[in-house]
Amino acid sequence: MDDLADMVEAAMSRYESGHARGLLESPDWLEVRSKAKELSAELEIKGKPVAATRVDREYVRLAEALRGAAAKNQPPKIKDDFALWDMSQEFLLTLRSLSRFQGEIDRQYRRSQVEEQQTSETKGLSRRAEIAWKDYQDAIGKGKFDNSPPTDREVWHWLLIHRRKGENLPNFDTWQRYIREARNFYGCQKNTPRAGREFGGSISVQGDL
């Protein structure tokens, strides 16, 4: 978080004698934009959606302020645009504040990963892996695929189409990780449903409607 704050400060200072348009079109700002997206995604993954939303909101406000300044007929220099500097300071304050808790955020995330792994190994599957495994077996039983057995990606694409409205499906990499977890837990080979497991009813196909 501090590294993103440093990048924003450096970019603002480097272009302070120029106009907002020059900053927006610079490699420096492209890097800031990319880093802000990465930070937001990282916070979401680590279970901090409120912090992620805050980073998104403050970045968007600063970017909109820059675009507004760039659209003026006679845009002031960045160093003379008080509103723009004020917006940048709000973004920096958010980043600096969050950086104070980065160590704790990382510790909590590592702890949750360990606990989830321990739950899988000692008490059974994680809830997410169990749901993914159930959906996987439903798809194998009800779907029609080009390959036999189908690849994980084919099954995932089938689920994207046939899951009931309102049910969310994780992205492919996350979903496949859950499937691997379930295979390891049940001792199954790839693309082989668990013996004796009846197919569930959470997936809708046209013939069911």
Image (cartoon, rainbow, N blue to C red):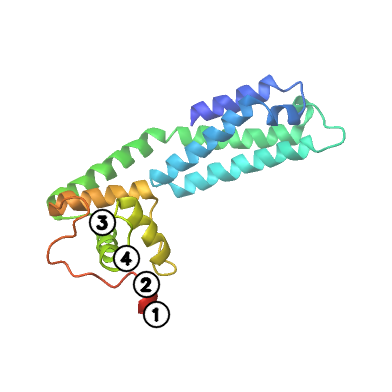
Q: Amino acid at mark 4?
A: Gly
Residue receiving disc 2: 205
The disc, 3 or 2, on the residue closer to the chain's N-terminal end is 3
Left/right placement of residue 123 relative to residue 34 reads left
> What secondary structure is marked by label 1?
loop
Q: Amino acid at mark 3?
A: Ser
Q: Are marks 3 and 4 in contact (CB under 8 Å)?
A: no
Disc ID at residue 198: none
Disc ID at residue 148: 3
> What secondary structure is marked by label 2?
loop
Q: Is residue 30 above or below residue 154?
A: above
> In terms of image quadrants, where is residue 141?
bottom left
Q: Are marks 2 and 1 in contact (CB under 8 Å)?
A: yes
Q: Amino acid at mark 1?
A: Leu
The disc, 1 or 4, on the residue closer to the chain's N-terminal end is 4
Disc ID at residue 209: 1
Counting from the top left corner in percent of width and height, residue 202 is at 32, 70
Residue receiving disc 4: 143
Q: CA distance from mark 2 to mark 1?
A: 7 Å
Outermost residue toward the bottom in this view: 209
> What secondary structure is marked by label 3?
loop
Q: Are marks 3 and 1 in contact (CB under 8 Å)?
A: no
Which mark's residue is nearer the viewer, 1 or 4?
A: 4
Which class describes the residues within 10 Å of circle 4: few (<14), some (14-19), or many (20+)? Answer: some
Counting from the top left corner in percent of width and height, residue 128 is at 29, 56
